[in-house]
Image (cartoon, rainbow, N blue to C red):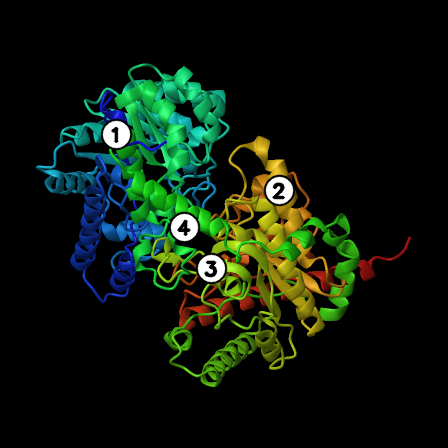
Amino acid sequence: MSFTNKESLLDLKNVKGHILGFPRIGAHRELKWALEDYWSKKITQGQLIQEANNLKQKNWLTQIEAGLDFVTVGDFAFYDHVLNMSSYLGVVPKRFQHKQGAPVDLDTYFRIARGRSVKGEDAPASDMTKWFDTNYHYIVPEFSTNQSFNVNGASLIQDIKRAQELATGKQGLGVKPVIIGPLSYLWLGKAVEAEEGSNKAVTLDKLDLLPDLLNAYSELLNDMAQQGVDWIQIDEPILSLDLSIEWKSAFERAYFQITKTSSKILLASYFGPLNENLALACSLPVAGIHLDGVAGHSDLANVLDKLPTYKVLSLGIVNGRNIWRNDLSKSLTLLQPFCDALGDRLWVASSCSLLHSPVDLGSEAKLTDDLKPALSFAVQKISEVATLASALNGKDVSEKITDANHAIQTRAQSTTVHNEQVRDKVDGVTDGLLNRHSPYIQRSLAQRAALNLPLYPTTTIGSFPQTKEIRSARRLYKKGELPKIAYDSAMEYSIRQAISEQELIGLDVLVHGEAERNDMVEYFGEQLNGYAFTEYGWVQSYGSRCVKPPIIAGDVSRPAPMTINWIQYAQSLTKKPVKGMLTGPITMLCWSFAREDISLKEQAYQIGLALREEVADLENAGITVIQMDEPALREGLPLRRADWSEYLKWAVDAFRLSVAVVQDTTQIHTHMCYSEFNDIISSIADLDADVITIETSRSNMELLNAFEAFEYPNEIGPGVYDIHSPIVPNQEWMQALIEKAAQRIPAERLWVNPDCGLKTRGWPETREALTLMVSAATTLRAQAVAGSNKQVKEHASVEPA
């Protein structure tokens, strides 16, 4: 299929191209640096806003210059787009002392997200959790029984006006605002259990808030319509989930009300197929719907039968979540029947927002000649969308198609992709490799004898503050400007400091601090065959926090030990156990850009086998506690429950494959954070880790609700303070959380720890928080001893009958 001008002369089309959103961080993380400079009072709020406006304008111009038919507006956020929606609606928890009805100022916005900003009093930050099955985190809206909604979308309206000014004079170019839909916004929020400042328990069905929320949405949509926008994109990603009849009915009520605006509504869903919700989406009174043609490919077979004849269909055929170049020939073959059936009612799009992609491949200078042409970042994805639309409209894009075909074929034939020895090892995995020698009950006795830890043992998750000196040494060494001997000396100094600090604080199980690690996935990927790395492939995780996911570019294997020398050095400095720190196979998979030519399961097993070799070497080196972090286990869970069991089986098995090589006396830890784990608690138990540390502090130990119906068999450390907030909690707060946990978990199986690593914190606050944490654990130990002694005395005082 060549798609030339000649072939299209008789049937000219006007297929439109657009994206659902663009990365907000900047090609060189400009937003990150501006945010952190503002929070540290190095720049003014006006300077921060100016940097944001510069980024927005650059993003809009990129879309215009690529030839898209719409500029997408409203996708920018200073911290998070869900928090943006809360600010538009005036949804601010009472503890932030916001005047009802007033606009949400930027410092209040930041305090909701972080607990602290330049102005205003500190308050506990709102909960943060994963955005569906991605590594992006959103700030969870909090709803109360007396919840009100007060619309103020002035910042969004201003962005619409600025984008319209850029679009002036460009024929056929529209400005398309995007907001989260009312049902997804409600779904993503949480109902608080009690009114703030009151001990009175309340019950709140979030759908009870829908009528007032719809009034607010109608007002906001009308405000946008008054600016002359023709189309408004409303994102309802929960349409890809299993919905109850109540929520499905709510969609009908909601959209019959809010579509009375004069603007046309494009209802967008993504991250998976709509399945049984497809008919519902097509029947809603909107002018068009968007489907994820990548993750939701199965919907494409049925949508034409269900789509009314007047509606636009936007097909997300360019993958917004991976970095592999689009196969333009294949995409055009898929799109052509839709073009024939719909004509101008077909739009071509990214599958989801490009928020999940790095910004621009053009900045990369060190990728191999066979790999770089096979990749596509956000800027390139925009061009792919525009190319597909152009081809369907009869323009000659044959040169671009040929170039894409050549790049894809060259990469597939590269000798760096396939390793038959690795494939054979995966084929040889049996159930015997997945099981520890003994069950937990027996192992725990052996480990207690070997480790001799106290009640409520204390530890941290792994990383300690990454100081300017650490980052500088690592950067200079990577650039070849610092000799290895000097680099090693700098890292050893940091390890000695970390061990010394932990000894002084009184922690029971220590860590080496991870000074040598840039990122928990990238560090290991750099030492494994099969991985490739970018220089500027940053993706936002939350707020100013960005990650640079590696690329799984070939079969994965371990050529040499990765962590042994650093951990051995740390262990030589103390008699206390030092944890060997590794990143688990599912997290290595989910937090990388995975291959698309083999299954995720096979990639996880390849990584698991490589990590298994490292675990064995750590144990042989005398390391008795090994932590295999798996924060992405929940993230990788399919959106539909019907698909859970298959994923959980191979994901759990990949973890067990990694660690089951050790003896009973070696204690295996794992760590998870910022996801909803309650619904997979049995699978977490199936990991059979001796100890799991898990985030619970921001959510005030909500995870413990899972233990009402499930008796967790092993040891657990529910995080007692939130490291993502700069606020240092007091000892009473941490002690109360431990006591709350002890109501569900036997004290002899409870650990005391922060909820995540400490790399983003400074030493003063780290030192203070950990000292208070240890003091809380010490107090509880003393109370336990006193209680035990009292019971012994009472028993002794009772005379026998």
Q: In the rendering, at what x and y percent does residue 400 appear?
A: 31, 43
Mark 4–mark 1 Cα distance, whole angstroms, equals: 25 Å
Residue designated by label 4 = 374
Q: Quadrant of residue 622?
A: bottom right
Q: Is residue 794 visible?
A: no
* Residue that sits furthest to the right in the current view: 801
Q: In the image, what residue type sits under mark 2?
A: Leu
Q: Nearer the viewer, residue 59 or 464?
A: 59
First along the sequence among labels 3 and 2: 3
Q: Residue drawn 62% across and 77% down?
A: 568
Residue designated by label 1 = 394
Q: Nearer the viewer, mark 3 or mark 2?
A: 3
Q: In the image, what residue type sits under mark 4?
A: Ala
Mark 4–mark 3 Cα distance, whole angstroms, equals: 13 Å
First along the sequence among labels 4 and 1: 4
Q: Nearer the viewer, mark 2 or mark 4?
A: 4
Residue 648 tag number: 2
Q: Does 404 sit left or right of 577 as displayed?
A: left
Mark 3–mark 2 Cα distance, whole angstroms, equals: 27 Å
Is 281 placed above or below 558 here? above
Name the image quarter holding the N terminus.
top left
Q: Nearer the viewer, residue 328 or 451?
A: 328
Mark 2–mark 4 Cα distance, whole angstroms, equals: 31 Å
Q: Secondary structure at mark 4?
A: helix
Disc tally is 4
Mark 2–mark 1 Cα distance, whole angstroms, equals: 46 Å
Q: In the image, what residue type sits under mark 3?
A: Ala
Residue 532 tag number: 3
Q: Nearer the viewer, mark 4 or mark 3?
A: 4
First along the sequence among labels 2 and 1: 1
Q: In the image, what residue type sits under mark 1?
A: Gly
